[in-house]
Amino acid sequence: MNPLSLAGQVALVTGAGHGIGRASALALADAGALVIASDVDFARAAETEQLIKSAGNAGVAAVADITDEEAMRKVVDDVVRTHGRLDIVHANAGVLMAGTALTQTLDEWDKTFAVNVRGTFITVRSVLPQMIKQKSGAIIITASVSGLIGEPDLAAYNASKGALVNFTRQVAVEYAEHGIRVNGICPGWIETGFNDPVLGHLDPEELGQLVGRQVPLGRQGTPEDIAPSVVFLASDWARYITGQLLPIDGGLTSM
Ligand SMILES: NC(=O)c1ccc[n+]([C@@H]2O[C@H](COP(=O)([O-])OP(=O)(O)OC[C@H]3O[C@@H](n4cnc5c(N)ncnc54)[C@H](O)[C@@H]3O)[C@@H](O)[C@H]2O)c1
């Protein structure tokens, strides 16, 4: 069998109703996995389910806020009861609020950490027991280049993604003995609307100039630029890779 094939595997993607999570859900399903597309916004998750099915693949929508441990556990319990297993988790949902160390409000700081750090922590600990039982699993955490470098106006976001970078390593080290691999992806600037709080005030020409200066490949990425790496990290081709953070950024962090 093609080692990139995920046939027979069950995958859960959070934040699967839009952007990177949706593209990842579609790509994992295209590689043969049955995908549970979960989002806090059920209508968006249901759209992703429809897109997966229109492509002739298997997908089911689910609703859960990743900050709600009970809701996440319920999603995972339902998956295991219905499908018997859970092999791949893309812990992807996140939020961004602009602010400097002086302008970022404590409320924004707390909300950013509640979703990005605590929510990812909840996602990971909701799925670990089943993966330990199966003695296998692949977890992919969406960190960011924002967890590797400092950027203006992103105090809480940079700090939260930095936390995910080392959380990825910590979980990888702790659960390797159970056959569970944990890796992170670090997307650069991806056109989903997510960066509007920091880039939205620029007109197209200004944005083009900024991208031209900061991204060696000369363009923003798309969710479809990210998804193949998720499939790879989930697959048997990546069987000896764990605890790693993969920048997918058009060269941004090499500048
Ligand atoms: N877009 C970028 O440039 C970029 C770069 C690096 C990393 N990221 C990360 O990628 C991830 C997805 O970003 P995107 O650009 O696809 O964003 P997006 O806004 O296009 O999609 C995010 C999805 O997550 C869902 N979501 C938000 N909060 C949630 C919660 N508490 N529980 C469940 N679902 C929730 C939203 O409803 C939405 O469908 C985030 O973790 C983000 O930090 C994005």
Image (cartoon, grey):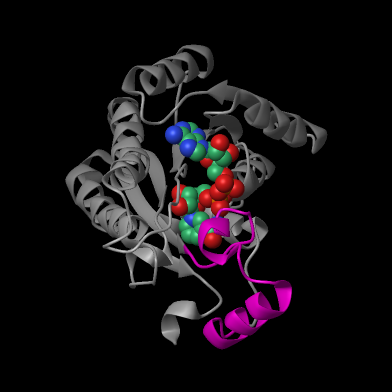
The location of residue 162, given as percent across then percent down, is: 28, 60
Front residue of 227/114: it is 114
Residue extent of the magenta highlight: 187-216
Front residue of 149/234: it is 149
The location of residue 80, given as percent across then percent down, is: 45, 18
Q: Residue at x 44, y 38 (%)?
A: 89
| Above or below, comparing residue 203 to residue 55 in the picture | below
Quarter of the image where one finds residue 62: top right
Q: Residue at x 54, y 22 (%)?
A: 63
Q: Is residue 118 visible?
A: yes
The location of residue 223, given as percent across then percent down, is: 63, 56
Quarter of the image where one finds residue 210: bottom right
The location of residue 209, given as percent across then percent down, is: 64, 84
Q: Residue at x 63, y 54 (%)?
A: 192
Q: Is residue 5 visible?
A: no
Q: How many marks?
A: 0
